[in-house]
Amino acid sequence: MKVLVPIKRVVDYNVKVRVKSDNTDVDLNNLKMSINPFCEIAVEEAIRLKEAGIATEIIAVSIGEKACQEQIRTALALGADRGIHIETDGNSQPLAIAKLLAKIVKEEQPQIVLLGKQSIDGDNNQTGQMLAALTNMPQGTFASMVKVDGDSVQVTREVDGGLVTLQLSLPAVITTDLRLNEPRRASVPNIMKAKRKPIAVKTPEELGVNVSGSLEVLKVDKPATRDAGVMVNSVDELIEKLRTQAKVI
Amino acid sequence: MTILVIAEHNNTSLKSDTHKVVAAAMDIAQYSNANIEVLIAGARCAAAAQQATKLAGISKVLIADHVCYEHQLAENVGLLVADLGKGYSHILTAASTTGKNFLPRVAALLDVAQISDIISVESSDTFQRPFYAGNAIATVKSNDAIKVITVRTSAFDAVDENNDVAMENIDNVQDAGLSSYVSSELTISERPELGSARVIVSGGRGMQNGENFKMLEELADKLGGGVGASRAAVDAGFVPNDMQVGQTGKIVAPELYIAVGISGAIQHLAGMKDSKVIVAINKDPDAPIFQIADFGLEADLFEAIPELISKLS
Ligand SMILES: Cc1cc2nc3c(=O)[nH]c(=O)nc-3n(C[C@H](O)[C@H](O)[C@H](O)COP(=O)(O)OP(=O)(O)OC[C@H]3O[C@@H](n4cnc5c(N)ncnc54)[C@H](O)[C@@H]3O)c2cc1C
Ligand SMILES: Nc1ncnc2c1ncn2[C@@H]1O[C@H](COP(=O)(O)O)[C@@H](O)[C@H]1O
């Protein structure tokens, strides 16, 4: 079976972004960019499905500026077989991303689409669920375990109260949570090999999708800063402060 | 204009998230003069619906009672809410793992955007939401006819239960037949849920193992609080996943948050930096957690926590 893995290029998780002084956006100039960590977990899961003889081909797809081909190359170096880049200005909202992915799903007919649960830049947590709705597929979101069994898949989900396991008919959409696996790193020979793997480039126009979104960002602010705190010297002082100054115990 | 709130419940009673989402809906209603209706989709959920009729600020409760909604399967609840939602100006639910699961399906089926995790209402079409792990706050205006919204419940105060409105049955059952419930492993705890706890004591990698979390439980019990954790503590298997606080775990804002053996990575701060008072206990004076703590104690937690417990007795 084919597995489709949508991956997003985002600011590296170690970077703390700053808001631009004109409050129009965050400043991404010269920041380190990476594959969204949840997408890395999705790529890893796809590779494990292939190693287990379940998946036959892994297709990594990324939507955004030309530079996201770097992240597609990383996925190819990790073990994806080919890439698809849908070139946009990089500002698309989740519904547009989901519509573009739905077109790719229609073309490629994957049995499983593995996405991250959340992009760590937009913090949307929407795309997989929207794609599932648009393609009338079931969804297993926030997955910590995936077990393919014939024409269905069992997905264990991390939920607010603990864990819930669902059975989904295939084809299905799965979104990854942190505990699904620990992604490997690409080896040097695989990075070399990845340079020869194909990346097809498409445009939203070719796919017939209007990518203009209905949400307008009016401004972007810095979060409220907290007043500087104090260091206390002992447990006694801490208790005293919490009792008499903060009055929370 | 009417606002539809999808309740969060366990079929028998409402979760306090619902009260907070209604508060957000009331903020919207204030700008648009809208009524607020609450939908309970569940199985044998009459008790939860009965409780919902008491929610302040609402005008009606809708109940869709059918086995296909028992486990809040996104495929089924999504179809129901998308179908019902066509007649509303806003559809709101909590940014819980349930809300985040089904609501984007609703938005896609209605061909509108979803606004995730709002923390304030600026007008009937403009909202604030954090992104980049809370390092930036966007003011977002929706140009859609139906605004589909998840609410960060830690940013709103629960409404009271002092109302008495009518209940209406919804019998247009939508079973997509795509998914089924197999099993669950829910964490049972006597302590308050993180979303509503007044005090939270959280442990990180510095706790070293799950056994040591007993100390934090004891401290939490002394303070009437709940116990949370960092991702590192969950990944290492010390505690279950539902205790993770952070950008991609639970977002909390208690009166008092005590971070023990947690370094203070941005992903962790994203989940707790709106707490009223933050205490950090860490043996590393350079730990970033101290930069946002109101009270920092540089100490070995294995000495400080037992001392704290005994002195609070
Ligand atoms: C995509 C993504 C999502 C993430 N989401 C989350 C999230 O939701 N929540 C979250 O928490 N993290 C999240 N993280 C992980 C985050 O980046 C950090 O790795 C994590 O928060 C670190 O946990 P920690 O502070 O417990 O561990 P560490 O960073 O290892 O810190 C341990 C601390 O304990 C202290 N310590 C050790 N021993 C003692 C002692 N005896 N006494 C006192 N202090 C001691 C040390 O000085 C140190 O500061 C995410 C990461 C990624 C990439
Ligand atoms: N521009 C994009 N290109 C490819 N995949 C994406 C893109 N945006 C989002 N996704 C996928 O959708 C997941 C969830 O993103 P989001 O809904 O933005 O939080 C990501 O982890 C990716 O798997």
Image: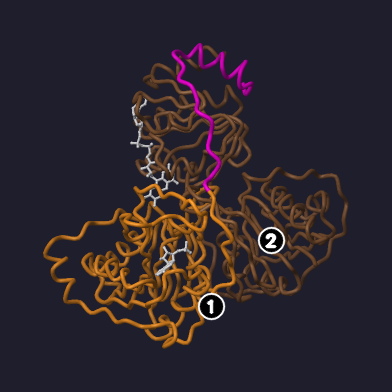
Residue A20 counted in the magenta span:
no
Residue range of the region highlighted in magenta in the rendering:
A222-249
Q: Which residue is mark 2?
A: B42
Which percent across, then down, holds residue A147?
A: 38, 64
State the scheme by which the image is colored: by chain
State which chain disc 2 sits on.
B
Q: Which residue is mark 1?
A: A134
Looking at the picture, tell me which residue is in the foreground, A147 or B19: B19
Label drawn at residue A16: none
User: Which amino acid type is marked by label 1?
Assistant: Leu
Looking at the picture, tell me which residue is in the foreground, B44 or B112: B112
Which image quadrant for residue B112?
bottom right
> What colour is chain B?
brown
Q: Report the residue at 74% width, 68% height from top.
A: B89
Q: CA distance from mark 2 to mark 1?
A: 24 Å
Q: Is residue B117 above or below residue B231?
A: below
State which chain disc 1 sits on.
A
The orange-coloured chain is labelled A
Ligand 2 is in which quadrant of the figure? bottom left
User: Which amino acid type is marked by label 2?
Assistant: Gly
